[in-house]
Amino acid sequence: MSPEQGWDRYKNTFTNIADPGAWTKRITELEALTADQELAESEPGQQSHYTHRLHLAGRTIEGRAVRALCGVFFVPTQDHAARQPCPDCQARFSELPA
């Protein structure tokens, strides 16, 4: 499973491949899924993040990533009320002028 949160950004690609062994593990998983003709499932994130609301609805519908206040890239597809809020996002949001 690939995570829905905690991605790094490289140019216009969002990835979590910087972790040691991630390439090899992901290639093995994808080869097995292809051989079995199955679709990959994603691993839900553990926190809800704060992000700018500009184009949020469109990106949610399109499945495109957004950047949270804490710097994490994620695809906004989850019910944010069901997750614990990100402490870094909360701290940065509280520093914004009202």
Image: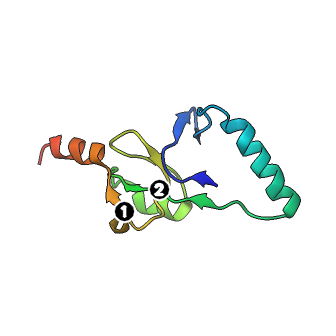
Q: Secondary structure at mark 2?
A: loop
Residue occupied by mark 1: 83
The answer to whether 79 appears left or right of 31 in the picture is left
Q: Which of the two residues, 68 or 33, is positioned nearer the viewer here?
A: 33
The answer to whether 24 appears left or right of 62 in the picture is right
User: Residue at the spot x=13%, y=43% of the render?
Assistant: 97
The quadrant of the image that shows the N terminus is bottom right
Whether label 1 touches label 2, CB < 8 Å: yes
User: Residue at the spot x=72%, y=42% of the render?
Assistant: 25
The answer to whether 13 appears left or right of 27 in the picture is left
Q: Which of the two residues, 21 or 30, is positioned nearer the viewer here?
A: 21
Figure check: 97 above or below 33? above
Residue type at the position of mark 1: Arg
Q: Position of residue 44 (x, y in %)?
A: 51, 59
Q: Position of residue 67 (x, y in %)?
A: 42, 44
Q: Quadrant of residue 47?
A: bottom left
Q: Which of the two residues, 76 or 5, is positioned nearer the viewer here?
A: 5
Residue occupied by mark 2: 45
Distance CA(mark 1)–CA(mark 2): 8 Å
Q: Quadrant of residue 71?
A: top left
User: Residue at the spot x=60%, y=58% of the render?
Assistant: 42
User: Residue at the spot x=67%, y=34% of the render?
Assistant: 21
